[in-house]
Each structure stands twice: as structure tokens, then as C-alpha cells.
Image: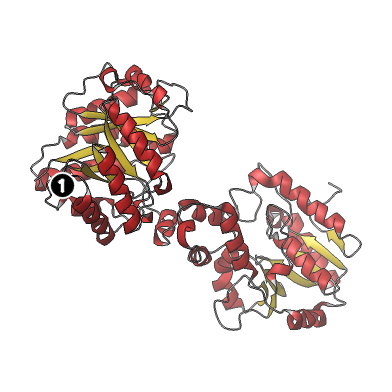
Amino acid sequence: MGEIRLLDCTLRDGGYINDWNFGHDNLVNVFERLVDAGVDIIEVGFLDERRKFDINRSIMPDTESVGRIFGELDRKSSMVVGMIDYGTCSLSNILPAEDSFLDGIRVIFKKHLREQAMEYCGELGALGYKVFAQLVSVTSYDDGEMLDLVRLANKYKPYAVSMVDTYGLMHQNNLMHYFKLLDDNLDPAIGLGYHAHNNFQMGYANCIAMLSNKIERTMIVDGSVYGMGKSAGNAPTELIAMHMNASLGKDYRISQMLEAIDSSIIQFYAPAAWGYNMFYYLAASNDCHPSYVAYLMDKRTLSVRSINEILGRLEGEKKLLYDKNYIEKLYLDYEKNEINDEEDRLALVKVLKGRKILIIGPGATMESDAARERILDYVREEKPTVISVNYIPKSFRPDYVFLSNSKRYLQLASKLSRTRQMIIATSNLTETTDGAFAYRLNYGSLIDLDTDIIDNSLVMLLKALIGIGIDKVSLAGFDGYSAIKQNYVREDMEYDFIKDKAKYLNSYVRGFLRSVKDKITVEFLTRSRYSDRL
């Protein structure tokens, strides 16, 4: 049976959490603890010529910098490696291995770069390094592509080829499929490794599954202490070591790993927690790049169900190669849900035409006693038809609720079902029960594709009212946005991105109101940044 080796990548993969700024004392402490724990291979960071040397960071422009940080430390029996993302560190920045603190270099690359990257691995090998070919997003390889990679590996003979489950998609069946394909076809002298991510909480279990195989070649499993790493994090080194001690006759000193966690790693967890969460589950369950999930979640208008349905429309190579234009089109196509709303518009004409209309929004002013009194006085005196927007006021019941935001709808759904509110909804929303929407309006005709936030709810409702001939409305609770104050009646309604875009959003709505002033008169009952009079 071949040798089994444990590799720790905390100082490299963990650096995605803190921009590799561990601090020099922590870099030294983690390294020395891992050495004393008996970890076989320690990855000390990235080599990236685009970054300047910083003694506090484990991302370094060249191999000489590695020595400046770690060179005085005793590695004992541990192998020390660094990592290069292919294309970010030229050979001119790499000293020969005999003059370097590094014993090996791991090279990560996407499959379409495999020919050039494997040639680069060969050049690093010629400098005397143990070279690891790291197959980014291994699940994107079909069998033919994997066998072509094997051909290249057998030509350039790296120290090891590692399966990198970049997006945490692997379960044991596909892990073992790739494992067997590589083990059956790689030159026997080439080791076989696995680097897990924990999107499905499968990292540790998959490491155990791989280690259960008795093969003749060297096997390498990656971990990071406390699972610290990109996205959902890695398989925890201390857990893998525990298993290897119990089942494979190893003698790693886990107490040293725990000391590293307590003294150097735990401080980075609270500000930027890593590990399993819904975000990474959505990415993994749809076999897609996490940036697609981030893009859709940043919209802040989509329910999780809607996000999942849009991700389900991703196809082919696009799934793992992020394309903003592609996901934008899928989002717009999904949201449009084109319908013929002519009958509903005619029905709205009958109930709204000739009526005074008051539109109420969820601005923070709705918590003001003075504002509430003014609104109640207006309602008593003018007896308007009241339409609230993605919100139900506490002080009185509106005649209609306008819904354009899936997330807000789901938050209100139980209350709406109890109060039997009349709902005017845009076509991007799906009814939770049959017949919940009294009127449905075509979403695609109300959005504005020429602005950053295409679906401002007030703008959409005003467009709809203009379209059915309403020429005057009063507004309350549409405060506009502040970069420093609470914007909504409830703190849990706030969107993270709003405060960054407050000035832009206020300017956009003011511009819209000016552009339609010949079609509709808008009166503000409460203070608003949308009003040119402020």
C-alpha cells in the first residue's frame, strides 16, 4: 500500500477569509504548530507576482519572499509547499528548489488551460520542485477530458495530481468515479490527492471515503484547521488527523492543531464566518458558480424558491464559468413572466378611475405620530382609495396592497391570507394559494431596463396607474433613502446595498417624477427625498 499524507492549507486557502493578512506572529505560530503536530505537508500561501511583499500576509510575489517570512523556522520532517494560480507567477520569480524554502509548488488551473498549465508544471519540476497539478473544479471534467489530463500528467510527471472540488459538489459516488479513473490511468509514481469544500458538508466524509482505498500510489488529503477556507470552508485538518490516527495508524498531535485554532485562527471567524450555509448549498445543489447565487441574492427581491428556479435554468459549461450577462438575461426572462393583463387593467379602471388615491410606502416616517395623524386626517377628510406597497400599515387597513417583490410577498403571505386583502400583483410573483391575486399586471411592461435597480416598486405602480388613466395621487411613507439612517418602518426590511446606492436611488426617482409630471400630479403627505422641494 502506498504512503498516505496529510496536507494542511490553512495559510493559503484560509487567506480568502482575511486577504491573507494573518499577521506575522500568527503565520509563524500556525506553521510551528502544524510542524509540531507532525503534519506531512504544509502549504504556506500563494505565490502571486501581482502582490507586494508584506511580512504579515501569506500571499507573496516570489519564492524569495517565502524565505523572508518562514526561512528561519524549523520544518523538521514536514514538506513545505506554496501555490500558484496558473498565469499569476512567472518563472523569473521562482528560485531553483535548492535555493528556496519551498520543497514543492501546487499549480491550480481550469481545464481549458490544462495543456499550458501542465507544461508550466514541467518547467517547475525542472527547477527541482515537487509539483502538484491541482485540477480546479474537477467535476467539470468529463471522462475524455480527464483522460487527456492524465496523458499530460504522464508526460510531465508531477509529484501528484489532486482533485479539487472547488464548489463542494462531490458526493462519494462521483469522487470515487474520478478517483478510479485517475488511479487506473496515472503513472504509478504520481500521487493522487483530494481537496474538499464543504458546501454539502461532505468534505470530511469524502476524505474518509478516499482514505478507505488501499492503492499502491501515494494518497494526499487536504484540510485546514477549523475548516478555515474559501466559501463553505474545507475539511477540518483536526478531524482528518483524528480519523487517520484512529484508523490508519498515524500519530498526529491534534492538541497542537487545537492550540493553533485557539491562539491564531478563532479570531478570524467572527468577522467573516466560513462554513456550511444556505448560500453555498444553493450553489452546490445547482452545480454552479457561487457568483450566480451572489448576483441573484443581491437583487434582494427574489425568494429563495425563485433563486433556485433561476439557477436551475443554467446550462452546460456556463454553470461553472460565471457570466454576468448570462445570469442577467436568465433573471430578466424569469421575472418578466409575460402575461396579457388587458382585462385586469380594465377592471382596475372601473374601481380606481375618478377616485382620490393615496399610496402608502414602508418608510421610517410611518413610525412618526405626526405623520400617522396627518395620514389619518387625510383619509377621514378625503376618503381616498388607499394602496399600500409591499407593506401593510399597522394604523389602518388599505383597500389594496400592491406587490412586486417576491421576498416581501412571502414575508406578508400569512398576514395577507388572514386579512383577505385585495392584492394587485406583478406577474413575477407566484400566488401561494389559488386566486390570491385580485389583479395581475405584466411585470415586463413596468420595469426600467436602463437603470441599476430595474424594479423600483413605486415607479412600477405609478407607471401602472398612468397606464390606466390616473392623473393624480398622494404619497405617504416614501421617504427616499438615507446612507446613515434607518430607511424602513422595521429594521429587518433594510437592504444592505441600499445605503451604498441611496444618492443614486433618490436621484432616479426624482428624475422619474419629473419625467411624468405632465401625466400625473404627485403630492407628498410626508417628508421625502424624492421631492424636489426638499
**Vertical arrangement, residue 11 with respect to residue 142, above or below:** above
Q: Residue furthest right?
A: 518
Residue 515 point in image, percent of width and height: 86, 57
Kind of element beneath mark 1: helix
Task: Please indicate, yes or no, whether residue 105 appears anywhere in the rendered image.
Answer: yes
Q: Where residue 312 sits in the image (x, y, percent)?
A: 48, 66
Q: Tell me if 389 is positioned left or right of 305 in this view.
A: right
Question: Residue 100 appears in which quarter of the rendering?
Answer: top left
Question: Circle 1 sits on which residue?
Answer: 243
Is residue 169 visible in the rendered image? The answer is no
Give me the residue at 23% from left, 31% from top: 34
Total marks in image: 1
Q: Nearer the viewer, residue 427 or 161?
A: 161
Mark 1 closeness class: few <14, some 14–19, many ≥20 residues within 10 Å: some
Quadrant hosting residue 9: top left
Residue 283 lies left or right of residue 133; in this view the side is: right
Under mark 1, the amino acid is His
Tell me if 347 is positioned left or right of 113 in this view.
Answer: right
Q: Is residue 68 above or below residue 520?
A: above
The correct choice, above or below, for 117 with respect to 165 in the image is: above
Residue drawn where x is 77% and y is 54% of the image: 509
Question: Vertically, is 457 above or below 66?
Answer: below
- Observer-nearest of 103 and 340: 103
Give coordinates of residue 319: x percent, y percent.
Answer: 47, 58
Name the residue rendered at 49%, 57% in the picture: 318
Question: x, y (%) of residue 354?
Answer: 88, 77
Viewer-nearest residue: 310 or 479: 310
